[in-house]
Image (cartoon, rainbow, N blue to C red):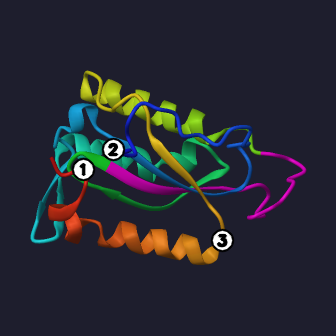
Amino acid sequence: MRSCDRKSIRLKDYNYSQPGYYFITICTINRDNILSNIIQDSINLSKIGQTVMNHLNNINLVYENVNLDSNVIMPNHIHLILELHDNGRLWAAAPTNPPIFSIPRIVNSFKTLTSKKYGSTLWQRGYYDHVIRGESELNKIREYIINNPAKWQEDEYNV
């Protein structure tokens, strides 16, 4: 199954507001190539792609417990790693003061705001998320994000 299909893949009974790192992929509606162009492994953002980047870069101003760790804006999807933190603690098993905002709330708000700027629906209904479990996995996903433009021709989202 492709990661942007409609079937929910959320972890049942998982608290998506607890501190940690989350890998997220969001696809454009109909997988339209409207966010960027990739020329010789270099990303050239479209106007809406620049708007998406501005919203991503300001996410920590909207949600004080959220940090954008890594991201890439591909022609028809984005990959990002969001870090949710609680009083500077990460990988906490049981935070005493859990963050107010959850990953679904943050992603849905982001999708709504950027769609309004675009003037119509920009994103597919669902999105893919993965709870990152440890430093090694975090570094592998960061590397995947960095190398994604160079692999665009073989990318499953390149339609």
Find residue 42 and report its image quarter. Answer: bottom left
Residue ID for mark 3:
134
Judge by depth and name the residue closer to the eye, 27 or 114.
27
Disc 3: CA contacts within 10 A as few (<14), some (14-19) or many (>=20)? few
- Where is residue 115? Give x, y as percent: 33, 28
Q: Compared to 29, does 42 lie above or below?
A: below
Q: Amino acid at mark 1?
A: Tyr
> In the rendered structure, which segment of residues is drawn in magenta?
78-98
Which tag, 1 or 3, sits closer to the chain's start? 3
Check residue 157 in the rendering and tell me which mark sits there, or answer none: 1
Which tag, 2 or 3, sits closer to the chain's start? 2
Q: Is residue 82 covered in magenta?
A: yes
Which tag, 2 or 1, sits closer to the chain's start? 2
Q: Compared to 155, does 120 lie above or below?
A: above
Check residue 52 in the rendering and tell me which mark sits there, or answer none: 2
Q: Main secondary structure of the magenta part?
A: loop
- Where is residue 125? Give x, y as percent: 40, 28
